[in-house]
Amino acid sequence: MLGSVLILGGDKKERLNRAWEVLAEHGFKSDSKGTPDADLLVVQREENKKSIGIAQARQCRDFLRERPFEKKVKAVLVEDAQALTDDAQGSLLKILEEPPAFGLIILLADKEGSLLSTVVSRCQKIAVPRIRVDRKDRKYVGKTAEQDNRGNAQLKDPGSKSLYKLSTYTYEQLFDLAKELSAKGKEEALDFLEQVLHEDIKSGASPSVVQKMEKALKELKDANVALKFALEHLFLMHMC
């Protein structure tokens, strides 16, 4: 697989694992992350920055202008493509649409809506399995495509409880859930909360609840807070 690839869904670790599977097809090794590879450029958010700006996007373009040094392929991996500014995304449009014959560009993002539609439309899409919460013990487990389809069918069943409907949890389960999510990291916690918000909207929750969730999500994205306590507070606020 060459060209422009967009890997969506899952958590960051799962997206990275899938990206390295694609890179491995072209001779790149995941342990090479500790050793510079002349034919691979890994783009990450700079320390203490919330976004990836146009300078780093131009670096991607410049990198792909030169032919591979050792391999037959030259690859760019953008780990947090959802952090690209609109200007940075715009500067990548041409090379995403017409990458060099030897070029591979891999963007990792939590969901399509995090990127401009013009970026999404120029990429081959790979979806990694979504996470789910088991109804019995509320633990995170991997979700296969078969389970995903079965889960979708269950959600359409009026007698079935949604995995993301917080009102179905006891307070003890909510505290356990906050602990589980904080251990997984901020990105996965945000993914889960976005599903909760989607469930609130779908189930006709009051505008005040939806507004509170939207505000809490934005604050959690922007703030550097103790994740476990922030989640506990948010869950309790949602239940009130």
Image: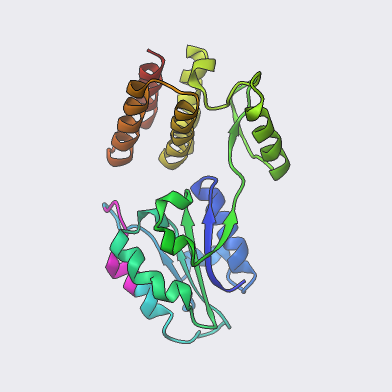
Q: Residue visible at 28% across and 67% down?
A: 54
Give the quarter of the figure containing the C terminus: top left
Q: Residue 53 lies in magenta, yes or no? A: yes
Instruction: Decide if residue 40 is in sight here.
Output: no
**Can you give x and y, in whole percent of width and height, for residue 29 in the image?**
58, 67
- Image location of residue 70, percent across then percent down: 54, 84
Q: Is residue 162 magenta?
A: no
Q: Is residue 46 visible?
A: yes
- Res 20 → quadrant: bottom right
Q: Which residue is at the front of the view, 148 or 75?
A: 148
- Which part of the image, by quadrant, shows the N terminus? bottom right
The colour mode here is rainbow
Total numbered circles? 0
> Toward the viewer: 201 or 90?
201
108 w.r.t. 184: above or below:
below
**Residue drawn at (55%, 79%) of the image:** 73
User: Residue drawn 49% across and 78% down?
Assistant: 39
What residue lies at 58% left-to-right and 68% top-to-bottom? 23
Left or right of 186? Residue 100 is right
Q: Is residue 83 above or below residue 136?
A: below
Q: Which x, y percent locates residue 146?
A: 73, 41
Give the x, y percent position of residue 48: 26, 52
Q: Look at the image and give the residue range highlighted in magenta.
A: 49-58
Q: Is residue 12 above or below residue 181?
A: below
- Vertical relation: 219 (above or below) 106: above
